[in-house]
């Protein structure tokens, strides 16, 4: 069988880089096009010298991409740019978008949180939310999948089953998140310099982080009512990884059993044995989510811990998992990478 | 005026090292003795080569310490060892203990949390809790001060005034703490190796961390009733610093004003302007605590952020501040260090 | 065709861990036994929780290993221990040793550098040195391969072809090496704690590092005479990677052409385009060696830069490459991992 | 006695920040003006929140600086900008420049290495090179001191005495330098992002780094003839610190004695006991230089190791030391900071 012809738009960012890493070990993918407007004309190893001895197509401009030549296009562009680009590509190839541009079903919510009108509202109804384990059937049929935000994914995996079964209070959910630096992207900014971030820890966007829009959309849907999530991301001096510490009210055993039951047949979502808590190191570079459950010393209060790699299950690994479904492949093809430790 | 003669017991650990750093720049301190049993006989620069061109007494064994020769002894030993040593020194010189051994007024609580009987219960009533800004008068008169735990200090500064004034709910206090690695000490352990901790983030002692005993003691006292604190420390790949993210229920303005009012005359505790949040980098190597207050998007919920350096205000800086009071010196003598950035 | 049955002795160290990582993605390997005396009885994920959702044999003691059941045994034990263990296994299965114990053909050199008599001198003549690209034919036939030391490998790849062709001076070779922390292993030691190594850089074993024994053996052999190498390793606050900066005297073009020619058909050894220098990040987690050549501003002086991942091409990747040859498999099977960036 | 009134131009860069840190603990300095054009109008704690509870003048534009009001002006601007600014300030106050703009006595060398004509050649003859221990008398009299580059300082301290006494070969000096990231400054650049630099090590400007111009000027002067230095800086994932590993040919005892003799009365330059080598951690945040000497195993070859903090002795500490001399103060005033460890 011929391999699937894929293109990666936004190939010189970190999610693009991670898509290339995964695609090269994917048994059914052939990278036919790497798009990066500002670096067009360069070889990929000029931008990322890890690929010095790997054969890859040279970087091209968007207008040199022939979508009809592709089975599937990954789009790893900044938000708002993504809407404009996908508007032009939609219908010509299947698309997996890694940006926030098609995640919110209500386009007025997009405008509210992202401070810009939606540039492709007519396409929005076609977009399927990319939280694979919960939208599998729709993803199989989709032409456009909007991947879940990395922070949101870390929170949704433990929370969705519990709210769906109504076994935790929806009034008091506190989500304290610790995130590695690569989530801030590859743009040159003073506040993500090594000398500004290493040897320190701090909150960022501590009240109105945009991923709240996704939390509200997804949690309200499963809880069938308002859910009050307090969300506080913190920046940690590490490259990859997200640890979500989630404080909920409910019964620890019931919570544990619910999660264990929900995920027992999922390849990438794993509930740890009782008494164990995860580290982001355990999933670095892999497509796994590990979840731990601990009864607090105060009756009726429970701590959940979930970890994932923001660039893998949090974006590019998730994207490939979705692409596999859209292309009729084994859902886990190319995603068996083991975490790189140490 | 003659300088105060001080000794440091446990000089080859990190709190001992930090005491030496601070004492060398202290205008009224003279280090007369450095005690470290296992390294006795070595020069201090053999253990910490930063002091290569500094004149310091050589390390001696405990039995070579002459407490009567000292105005004050700092004791930076592991818990339980500290009780045994201080039992022998008590009454011969003023003592500032940096361990957990005399923090809990109820010795049965000590036994419960530390898994060992208290070895000097007769001295316990003499010990004053070292949270300087709240025990100042007692510390001035004390012969033995038991410094507050580093994690506890990070939580108590924002919480004590609020509970004392009863303006937050005592039923739902969630304390999510991010701590640097030096807090784990200088003992050789696999789980604090560089290759085990860097590039990752994880909870540790996520339910029953011993500093809870101090939280319970101090918060119950000011709240005049039971306080339910959920406390979850996390290990961050940085050397120094603690960030406490605290989720409380109350009115944000009332909370802000209360803290601002309480600390406006305190040199080392600083409430940030509205809308600002702190980073541990802002206090690295200094004796400062910075506190930020943010209204959550959900009515009635508030986030507090407090940072300190675990080795400075969290232990050795706090110890010097207390020693200054005990010795009749200016409380802030030797503590004007500015944070080292980057 | 049945998969090759492999065992990993020393599975709870970093080279053991890396062997497991590689073997799990190897199309022809089946891990039948994981040996770790002190952790015998534990599951592998108890020791390395990254493998939480991977099925692996539980850890066993050495005496529970049945070598006759294995096609090949990897041995990642400390030196001297390795000799004793391999003495008992030799002849029962093919063996790839990752320690220093069989690298030196002259057993008196072993005694001189390692401070211990050789415990299996009768086996030494059977051992083939594991620098794959230079001992390929012997490795194919070998029953015991002694993998090259990680530091040595970083130096030998650029130096061997140049000395073999006699185009650099053998009198003045300066090898300044920068190495990540995982090379120091997983034993609990104060000097490899996070709080002792991060945020700093220092030489270690700056004159008589044991890898000099290998340099002398291999370089003297190809140069057919004495070679004066000054070797200075430095410890860098990063987990993986070695950068060797090598100062030689010769003609830059001749050197470049020689290396380019020698390695043009090698899959894992890559000479960078003129004017490029490598970073250890470019090879992290991959089996690649990248080499850069720069003409110094002083006539007749040349700088060589070579990078590899100490745990991959520097030990476990190299070991698998050798095992592939010994087992009649494709030499690069299981070794196509792309570097993990960032 | 009234304190000395000092101004800091370029206060929002790292050298400016370090000048503020040191000046605040300086017993004779009063900061009267902080200049930062792009941040003019902001408080200093808006830019560097470590100063939240410190009283400092607000940032102003250069045209608001009144040089006649200052005893001394520190200038921490980028090169070429510095020449233009100092041209306007010269003669109105004493000036210590931290840039490269007045280091090279031959203005044509400046043009050659910095790719720009010299904008103030008429002032150049007034500038004294800021390597304090070797230009002390001239600095005392100077109106303009041009501080030594951080990398150059790390190399000159061990090399100058040896070349002055002619006890090492001037034909073969190899200077392999490992430098922390803060040396690259605070400008937003992709290649100094945390996610680009952490967990890796690489050379930069490996042949023609501009600090070679200073090496040539100073070493040729003391050696009274051409000196061939090969200089290769490497970027290390740490904030502060430079380790220079220097390979020379000579007699190790003679070299050790020469350095020991030269520096025995210098407060900040310290030759380690025989057999010891330094780490950059030993000098982090201090004004010290530590130097180690090791005989190579090859006769006649010697390794020198020198460490300093690029922001302290490598720039801002050095600048204060020079300013002390220019202002008639104790040379070491304000410079007794002990290294921050860990």
Image: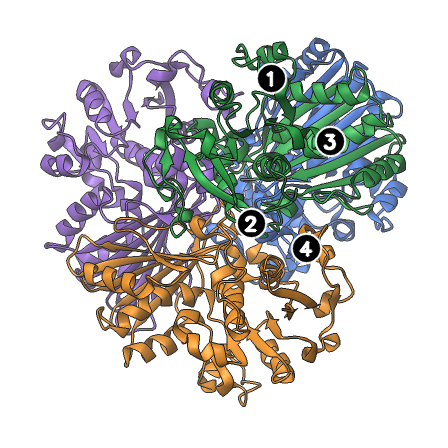
Chain colours: A orange, B purple, C green, D blue
Disc 4 crowd rating (10 Å Cα; few below 14, some 14-19, many 20+) is some
Question: In the rendered image, which residue does mark 4 sit on?
Answer: A48
Same subunit under labels 4 and 1?
A: no
| Callout 2 secondary element | loop
The front one of C164 and D102 is: C164
Q: Which circle's residue, 3 or 1, is located before the other in the chain?
A: 1
Question: In the rendered image, which residue does mark 3 sit on?
Answer: C134
Same subunit under labels 4 and 2?
A: no
Disc 3 crowd rating (10 Å Cα; few below 14, some 14-19, many 20+) is few
Q: Which circle's residue, 2 or 3, is located before the other in the chain?
A: 2
Q: Quadrant of residue C242?
A: top right
Distance between mark 4 and mark 1 Cα atoms: 43 Å
Q: Which mark is residue C124?
A: 1
| Callout 4 secondary element | loop
Question: In the rendered image, which residue does mark 2 sit on?
Answer: C27
Q: Quadrant of residue D335?
A: top right
Residue D136 appears in the rendering: no
- Residue B212's x, y, as percent? 21, 46
Distance between mark 4 and mark 3 Cα atoms: 29 Å
Q: Looking at the image, which residue sits at the far front?
A: C1
């Amino acid at each position: 069988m011929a391999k699937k012809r894929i293109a990666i738009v936004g190939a010189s960012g970190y999610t693009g880089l991670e898509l290339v890493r995964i695609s090269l070990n994917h048994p059914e993918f052939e990278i036919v096009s790497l798009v990066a407007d500002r670096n067009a004309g360069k070889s990929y190893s000029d931008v990322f010298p890890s690929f010095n001895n790997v054969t890859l197509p040279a970087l091209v401009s968007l207008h040199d991409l022939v979508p009809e030549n592709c089975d599937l296009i990954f789009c790893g562009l900044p938000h708002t740019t993504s809407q404009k680009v996908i508007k032009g590509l939609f219908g010509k190839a299947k698309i997996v978008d890694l940006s926030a541009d098609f995640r919110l079903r209500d386009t007025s919510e997009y405008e509210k949180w992202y401070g810009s009108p939606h540039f492709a509202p007519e396409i929005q109804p076609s977009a399927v939310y990319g939280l694979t384990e919960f939208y599998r059937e729709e993803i199989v049929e989709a032409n456009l999948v909007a991947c879940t935000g990395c922070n949101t994914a870390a929170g949704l995996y433990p929370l969705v089953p519990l709210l769906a079964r109504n076994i935790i209070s929806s009034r008091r959910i506190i989500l304290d998140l610790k995130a590695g630096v690569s989530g801030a992207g590859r743009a040159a900014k003073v506040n993500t310099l090594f000398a500004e971030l290493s040897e320190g820890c701090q909150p960022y966007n501590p009240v109105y982080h945009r991923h709240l829009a996704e939390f509200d959309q997804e949690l309200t849907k499963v809880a069938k009512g308002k859910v009050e999530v307090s969300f506080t991301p913190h920046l940690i001096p590490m490259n990859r990884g997200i640890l979500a510490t989630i404080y909920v009210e409910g019964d620890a055993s019931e919570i544990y059993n619910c999660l264990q039951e929900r995920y027992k047949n999922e390849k990438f979502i794993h509930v740890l044995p009782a008494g164990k808590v995860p580290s982001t190191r355990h999933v670095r570079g892999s497509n796994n989510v590990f979840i731990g459950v601990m009864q607090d010393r105060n009756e009726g209060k429970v701590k959940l811990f979930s970890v994932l790699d923001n660039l893998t299950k949090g974006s590019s690994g998730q994207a490939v998992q979705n692409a596999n479904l859209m292309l009729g492949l084994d859902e886990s093809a190319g995603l068996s990478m083991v975490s790189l430790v140490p």
